[in-house]
Amino acid sequence: METKVFEPGSEIKERARIKSMEEYRALVEEANKDYEGFWGRLAKEKIDWIEPYKQVLDDSNAPFYKWFIGGKLNVSYQCIDRHLDKRKNKAAIIWEGEPGDKRIITYLELYYEVNRFANLLKNRFGIKKGDRVVIYMPMIPEAAFAMLACARIGAIHSVVFGGFSAEALRDRIIDAKAKLVITADGAYRRGKPYLLKPVVDVALAKDCESIEAVLVVRRNNEEIKWHEGRDYDYNELIVQESPNCEPEIMDSEDPLFLLYTSGSTGKPKGVQHSQAGYILWAQTTMEWVFDVKENDTYWCTADVGWITGHTYIVYGPLAAGATTMMYEGVPVYPDAGRWWRMIEEYRVNQFYTAPTAIRLLHKMGENEPDKYDLSSLKILGTVGEPINPDAWMWYFMKIGGGECPIVDTWWQTETGGHMISPLPGATPIKPGSATFPLPGIFAEIIDQEGNKKEPNEKGYLCITKPWPSMIRTIWGDDERFVKSYYSTCKKNGKPVYFSGDGALYDEEGYIWITGRMDDVINVYGHRLGTAEIEAAIGHHPRVAEVAVVGKPDDIKGESVFAFVVLKSDEGVADELEIMKEINKVIVKDIGPIAKADEIAFVPGLPKTRSGKIMRRILRAIAKGEEIKQDTSTLEDPSVVEKIIEVVKR
Ligand code: PRX
């Protein structure tokens, strides 16, 4: 654990909204004393209500909490319309394509784009409040327009990351019973055009009866097939729509979007978020954690297909009236200086990215940042996984010039927004620690009975009170929601939210995340369920059994390590061939992000007598560690030696 502490400098203190630990503690105290009063105050101050709410929190049906009962609002109004008086000509979105093409969209233009899009959805496709719309898009402004257009008419969007395969897309379409898919012909990546629309065609080839139409945005004008009567050309249709569209009046608790994420079983979970609670926290954390100011340019490098892209590229920055940047391509095209050049050119003030990207860029160009003027930067952020001190120091010194606080933000798809994070003008930071819970967030490290852990003792990272931007349920599966999040830990006899992560306090109460306690792994900052990868590998006809574990990796965070038992004793003469085939199955079922880095063909898996696979043993073997676990309870203890032999080869 790093012991260095970096205090916020005077410049950042001066400009920050929360300027000291005293101010931070005062907010924490306010929430402690009067929890509902605290949230009610924020909701009144920050949301432009169409009708005020009547009650802050309804906990009568826990854990199905409800916030801001009776309130009426529209999230697209909160993100766009209400800024027009003061900011109509301010850049809302600055976008750069990978080939270098640029678009700057002002708030007024955004208003027209979103309204036209909303009218198109309503008038042409009959999309109504509550209908589900799947968005399978590259990083182009239309992805944001599509999300906001859904919000405007009350449709529930489900953005599916463009790196997911046709099968994965199909599963999500079916689960949500979506009516419409919005996609693009393709986009640019690593200097080349690629295609998305054909993936949609494959997905829709079976079992997607709910889909009535496909709307295609033309980005790279590559040739694609058009299905008469099903596929529509966005660029042709959009110009025919009126630029005015009344926002639908939404209830605080109406669903805003679904976002599928991995859990410990094979089936992804449709995390359901609400309107008011979500947008309140997206906006508040933008202000507190990134401290965006009127003239700032804020850049988050995530993809809109993940929660970070939802909350901190689209909803949070726009609700806060900020200028948000969006970039289409990879960080290393045409070279490892691409992002640094963009920071210089656009004079970016806040930069938010993932540790895996920092490690990659560090490795590819240690001194590359020296070539650029990065002095506009004020605040740096990280998200998605613990950051190692090496990467942290490089980011801090080379990118931030030793003067920009790093906000290491811990949160999840389910939490909607930041939960644990430094405040840039207040918190003394330690490399690798997400520091303290934000005011109003009761994040605690406890045992399963709710006793707070002593320093340096690992425990369950829980959130012991409900919060406005929390997951409402898993789409269509209330039972799984309760089981996944509210069945592991209790406090004062009542179930509390368990994040799935382990963590510990240090002597000064700083929180250090130690990683997932379930079978979820983190590859390139992407959350993947080992069960999902196992299910995919199991589809290969020669595979009898499989167990997947994460193995620590210097760049990716974790790599995918698969232990595979093949059917029959034909041997594995064609080992390389089968490995390739297995990866093909993974790419088909999930997408290239889940490919196995290492596959070991083993004679058996370490199982208890009741048939449970002892993954801890496999994790240790993958890491090349000594086996400390007691193997005598295994059905066949000798299998462990045999596996080690295979892996050593
Ligand atoms: O394990 C934690 C890790 O990412 C998980 C959440 O993944 P996802 O829902 O995809 O959301 C990622 C972006 C919010 C968490 O359970 N994680 C996230 N942020 C951090 C982190 N681990 C350590 N430090 C962080 N700052």
Image: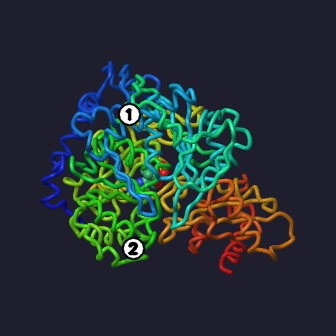
Q: Secondary structure at mark 1?
A: helix
Residue at 46% across, 42% down: 414
Q: In this view of the protein, which residue sits in the foreground, 545 or 283?
A: 283
Quadrant of the image for the N terminus?
bottom left
Q: Where does the image place residue 291, in percent across and percent down from the top left?
A: 24, 49
Residue at 74% across, 60% down: 635
User: What is the distance, in whole Å, between disc 2 and disc 1 at their CAs?
Assistant: 38 Å
Q: Residue 531: give its label.
A: none
Q: Residue 362: give its label.
A: 2
Quadrant of the image for the C terminus?
bottom right
In the rendered image, the vertical position of residue 294 relative to residue 191, given as above or below: above
Q: In this view of the protein, which residue sits in the foreground, 459 or 574?
A: 574
Residue at label 1? 76
Mark 1: amino acid: Ser
In the rendered image, the vertical position of residue 218 relative to residue 64, given as above or below: below
Q: In this view of the protein, which residue sits in the foreground, 605 or 113?
A: 113
Q: In this view of the protein, which residue sits in the foreground, 276 or 337?
A: 337
Judge: label 1 CB < 8 Å from ligand 1: no
Res 72 visible: yes
Mark 2: amino acid: His
Q: Where does the image place residue 264, in percent across and percent down from the top left?
A: 59, 49
Q: Residues within 10 Å of mark 2 (few under 14, many from 20)?
A: many
Horizontal side of residue 362 vs 637, given as left or right: left
**Between tags 2 and 1, which lies in front?**
1
Q: Residues within 10 Å of mark 1 (few under 14, many from 20)?
A: many
